[in-house]
Image (cartoon, rainbow, N blue to C red):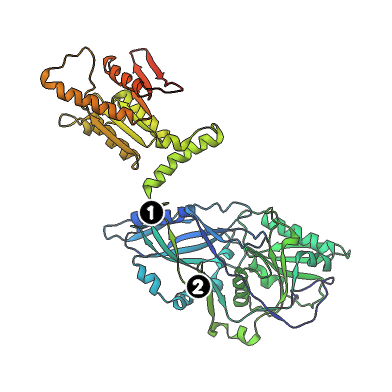
Amino acid sequence: MVVVSTLEDDEERGGEPVLLRFEARRSAVDPSFWQKIADVKLNRMHLSEAEIACESEFHASRNDGVDVPMFLTGASVTDERVRDDKDGNISSDSVSNSTSDDVGCWHAPGDVINFNVKERLFEMKPNEEAKKKGQELLDVMKTMDVDGSDETGDVNRLNTFRVFMHADLKKWKFFYWFLFPSVMFAPYEFMEKRRGDEEETICRSGNTKSRAECVKAWLDRPKSDFAWLMETVKGSDINTHVSSNHKLSKFAELCAGSGDFNSDRTVEICFVDNATGDAPSMSLLNVLTFLDVRFQRTIPIHVTCVRVNKKGIFDFKSCLFLKRVQPLQKEMLENMSNLEFKCIGWERDEKDKLKPRKADLSSAMDPEKLARDAVDLNLKLMRWRQAPALHVDAISKSKIVLVGAGTLGCSVARTLLGWGVRNITFIDDGRVSFSNPARQSLFTFEDCLDGGKPKARAAAERLKAIVPDINANYIEMRVPMPGHAVAESERAEVLESIDALEREIKNAEAVFLLTDTRESRWLPTLLCTAHNIQCYNCALGFDTYLAMRHGVPADPAPN
C-alpha cells in the first residue's frame, strides 16, 4: 500500500496526535434571494412545502481573518416550480441560473423548505432534522459516482446545505435557519499543522514548486470539484518532483500497493478552504468521512487547505497544511454500516445561539420601493458617470404643475417620471375622446368609454399605476382666457378658478404650459411672473414647435 504521507525530505515528526477542529460554515444572503423565494412561493408553490432547489456560491479564503461565507442571491434558486394540473400538483423543471463556469468560484447544491406557518420552523426538532439530512448525505457518499467520468462535479454534493424558513409576505420578514450537514462517526486527529512558509522551509523547493503549480492548474479549470487528490512523485534528481491532480474517486487506485512514511511518492487531499486561521472549514470533515465510508481508509493522509492571498490570487504560502490526518479505528471501519453517527452544522445566529435568524426586508422588498429605487438608480448612474452636478434629491422633491393633459402633457409627464420627479399636478377640463389614446400616451381605450374620463384625473391615475409611490394630483378646471366673455352667472366660478390656479402656481417649483391655444397660456404666464416661478412654454404646430423657458430674476422682488 502506498503511504499517503510525507516525502523523503519531509521528515517524520514525533509527538502525540492532536484533535482536529473545524470552522463552522456560515451564510451570506442577498435580499434578491428572498425576493426570488417570495416570487416562487406566491406564483408557483402556493401552499406546497416541497423543497426548492438552489445552490450557494463560495470562494477560497483570503486568509485575512474573515471566513468566506456561502453566498446566495436571486440567481441561486435553480428549481422553478409550476402547477401543471387542476389538482395543483407541482412538477419541477430545474433551470440552472448559476455561473458554474467561473474560475475561482465553486457552487454547492442545496434546497429550501419554506414552511407555511412560522410555528413549524420554531417548533421543529433540530436534532431529528439534522439526522435525516445526515442520512441523506451518507447515502450520497455511498452511492455517488466514483468512476471518475462524471465531469459535473459530484464531489460538490459533499458541500450540500438546507434552509428551513418561513416567509411572512405581509410584513416582508423572513425567518430562516441554515443547516450545513457534516457527518461524523468519531473525532479526527492529526500529527502536525504547518503554515505555508513552514511547509516551504521543511520541504525542498522542487517539491513545493511542483505542488503549487499543480494546485493552480486545478483551480484554473472551470467546473472543477472543490476537493481532489494530488499525487507527487520524486524524480531522479533530489530537487525534481512531478505532481498530478486526480478526482477523489481515484483514491483506491492511487493508494494501492505498499510503502512507508519515507516513500518517494505521496498522495494528499486538496480542498478549497473558505475558512481562515488555524482550523480548516467543516467541508473537510465530509471529505474525510467520504473516503472512510467509501474506501475504508486505513492510512494517514496529508491535507492541503487551499487558500488565496489578500488579492484573491492563489499563493502556496497562504495555504494551511495538516500532516498525517489519522484514519478511524479499524473496528469502526469494519462496522461502518451499523455505526451511529452525528450530523452537525446548524448555523448560529448573531448572538451565537442555535436558533433561527430573521431578515427584515419590509422596506427593501416593498415592490413600490423597488420601483422607486430603480428609477433613482438610473439618475444616480447619470450623475456618477456624466453629470456630477445633478441634484437627484432636489429633482425628486420638486413640485411640478402641468397646465394641459393632452399630447404634450402626457409626454412631458412621462419624461418627468424618468427624471425622478415625484410631485406632479395636472390642470385640464377636457375629457378623453376616441382619437386621444393613439397620440396621448397616458390614456387607453377604456378611458374613452361612457363619454370619456376627465383627462386630468385619467392622467394622474395612470401615473400612479406606472410609479405607485408618486404624488399625482389633478384639478378639473378651465383656465380663464383673455378675450373670452364671461357671463354674470359664471363670474364666481371664473374667479374661483383664478384663485385655484394661483394657489397651485405659488406652491410649484416649475410650471409647464402645454395647452392648445395661446390665450390659455396668458394667465398662467402672468402668475408665474408675478410669483417668480420657473415657466416652460411648449407648443406643437403641424411642422413647427416651440420650447421656451421664462426665467426668474436672480434677485427676486415682489411684482
467 horizontally vs 394: left or right: left
Q: Using the image as rendered, state which of residue 421 and residue 54 is in the foreground.
A: 421
Question: Residue 303, position in %: x, y?
Answer: 70, 70
Q: Using the image as rendered, state which of residue 81 and residue 277 is in the foreground.
A: 277
Q: In the rendered image, which residue does mark 1 sit on? A: 39
Q: Using the image as rendered, state which of residue 348 and residue 429 is in the foreground.
A: 429
In the rendered image, the quadrant that contains the N terminus is: bottom right
Q: Residue at x 62, y 68 (%)?
A: 281
Which class describes the residues within 10 Å of circle 1: few (<14), some (14-19), or many (20+)?
some
Q: Quadrant of residue 326?
A: bottom right
370 horizontally vs 209: left or right: left
Q: Look at label 1 and name its amino acid.
A: Asp
Extreme residue in the right direction: 237
376 horizontally vs 474: left or right: right
Above or below 306: residue 491: above
Instruction: Give SS at disc 2.
Output: loop
Which class describes the residues within 10 Å of circle 2: few (<14), some (14-19), or many (20+)?
few
Q: Quadrant of residue 455?
A: top left
Q: In the rendered image, which residue does mark 2 sit on? A: 353
Q: Is residue 434 visible?
A: no
Question: Residue 207, position in %: x, y?
Answer: 81, 64
Q: Is residue 486 visible?
A: yes
Marks 2 and 1, the one that precedes in the sequence: 1
